[in-house]
């Protein structure tokens, strides 16, 4: 069976729209100055791959709501625009987290810092890299709007979609701030960590893309409610799986060094659960190692052992299973296009297993 992400040739079609957009925008940028070429190159590298989850949920949200087939290419274009919003989020998130890599390549701010060093320019390479990455993320945010709202839909459909999109961006930025706040506070309860998950990832990754597609299709309130019942728990499960991979994942699959989330000190649900269950000795080890940028393989192994021994890993796996069950129950009760229902079911299983 093909991946649910490849039904309707979604990934190659999204890639074509992304490539065409970058090519068109590069003409404008290089007309301003050839010195802007590195911005284009960095974005081309970042967007040459990826799972395309958000476009998939937006497109199948439109299909599921019985969108008019005449607007199918436009629905794919609008969905593909979310890749630029995701690029903005990734670039800025890497700056905030101080991440070194993204998808197996240097993170944008590291890439531009390297350009600064190679050319022996004046000032701080790190400051230059951070500034360049922030601007590249801002460009992506602007281009996302252009791609989505230049799709050929009736004005009333675009107006409905814009209301969803506006709320989606606000929720994303709010979630990003709450994530920063949790890092600064040194983490807190599992409940607070789950709230970060809900707004930084769950709504933005699945629920709101589904709603965007539904808005373009002029879906009923019942469909919106079903998409929330499916999308929110699935989005939370997706992020919980991401948290597990950030600690226990294979670098060949994640594109990041082993245990990178531990070096960054991410206050995830997985970590919060472990902290709540730690013995005094384990708690001391967590305080000493979590967030240490120089954490070596021995330290990573020690923290992994604590997370496993406290039952945090098993509890998080149980949460994923329960959330997936809730998600699929909502989907099964909805009045949706049959092909879309099948694909969304496959996406739910793939997202929680990361079997893409």
Image (tube, grey):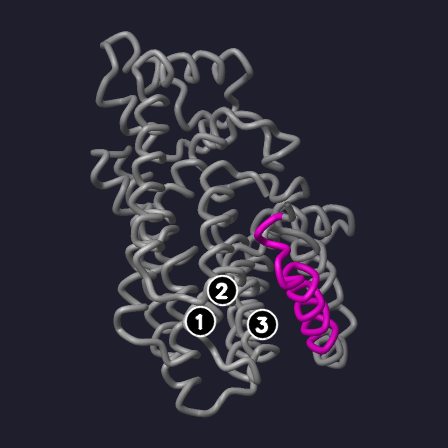
Decide which of 184, 57 is in the foreground and name it. Answer: 57
Of the residues under marks 1 and 3, which one precedes in the sequence? Answer: 3
| Contact check, label 2 and label 3, Cβ < 8 Å | no
Please, what secondary structure does the residue beneath circle 3 have? Answer: helix
Left or right: 155 as drawn, with respect to 255? left
User: Which quadrant of the view contains residue 321?
Assistant: top left
Decide which of 163, 69 is in the foreground and name it. Answer: 69
Residue 329 visible? The answer is yes
Residue to which mark 3 is pinned:
76
Of the residues under marks 2 and 3, which one precedes in the sequence? Answer: 2
x and y percent of residue 6 in the render?
64, 55
How would you rate the neighbour count of disc 2 (Cα within 10 Å): few for under 14, some for 14-19, many for 20 or more?
A: many
Left or right: 151 as drawn, with respect to 9? left
- Which stretch appears magenta? 3-25
Chief secondary structure of the magenta portion? helix
**How far, Cα to Cα, is label 1 from label 2?**
7 Å
Residue to which mark 2 is pinned:
60
**How far, Cα to Cα, is label 2 from label 3?**
9 Å
Of the residues under marks 1 and 2, which one precedes in the sequence? Answer: 2
Q: Which residue is drawn at 70% across and 51% down?
A: 116
| Residue 291 against residue 310 in the figure, above or below | below
């Amino acid at each position: 069976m093909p991946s649910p992400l490849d039904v309707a040739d979604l990934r190659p079609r999204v890639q074509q729209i992304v490539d065409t957009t970058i090519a068109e925008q590069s003409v404008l940028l290089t007309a301003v100055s050839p010195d802007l070429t590195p911005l284009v190159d960095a974005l081309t590298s970042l967007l040459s791959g990826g799972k395309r989850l958000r476009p998939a949920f937006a497109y199948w949200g439109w299909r599921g709501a019985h969108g008019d087939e005449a607007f199918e290419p436009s629905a794919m274009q609008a969905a593909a625009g979310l890749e630029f919003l995701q690029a903005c989020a990734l670039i800025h998130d890497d700056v905030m987290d101080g991440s070194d890599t993204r998808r197996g390549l240097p993170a944008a701010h590291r890439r531009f810092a390297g350009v600064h060093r190679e050319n022996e320019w004046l000032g701080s390479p790190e400051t230059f890299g951070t500034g360049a990455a922030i601007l590249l993320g801002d460009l992506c945010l602007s281009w996302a709007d252009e791609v989505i709202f230049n799709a050929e839909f009736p004005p009333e459909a675009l107006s409905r979609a814009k209301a969803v999109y506006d709320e989606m961006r606000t929720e994303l930025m709010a979630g990003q701030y709450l994530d920063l706040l949790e890092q600064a506070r040194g983490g807190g309860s599992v409940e607070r960590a789950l709230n970060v998950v809900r707004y930084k990832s769950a709504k933005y990754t699945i629920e709101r893309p589904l709603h965007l597609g539904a808005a373009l299709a002029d879906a009923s309130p019942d469909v919106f409610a079903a998409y929330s019942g499916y999308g929110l728990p699935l989005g939370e499960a997706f992020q919980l799986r991401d948290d597990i991979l950030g600690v226990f994942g294979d670098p060949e699959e994640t594109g990041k060094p082993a245990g990178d989330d531990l070096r960054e000190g991410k206050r995830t649900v997985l970590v919060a659960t472990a902290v709540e269950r730690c013995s005094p000795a384990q708690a001391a080890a967590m305080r000493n190692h979590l967030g240490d940028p120089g954490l070596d393989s021995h330290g990573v192994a020690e923290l992994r052992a604590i997370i496993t021994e406290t039952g945090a890993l098993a509890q998080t796996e149980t949460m994923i299973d329960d959330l997936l069950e809730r998600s699929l129950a909502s989907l099964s009760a909805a009045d949706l296009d049959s092909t879309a229902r099948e694909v969304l079911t496959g996406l739910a299983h793939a997202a929680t297993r990361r079997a893409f």
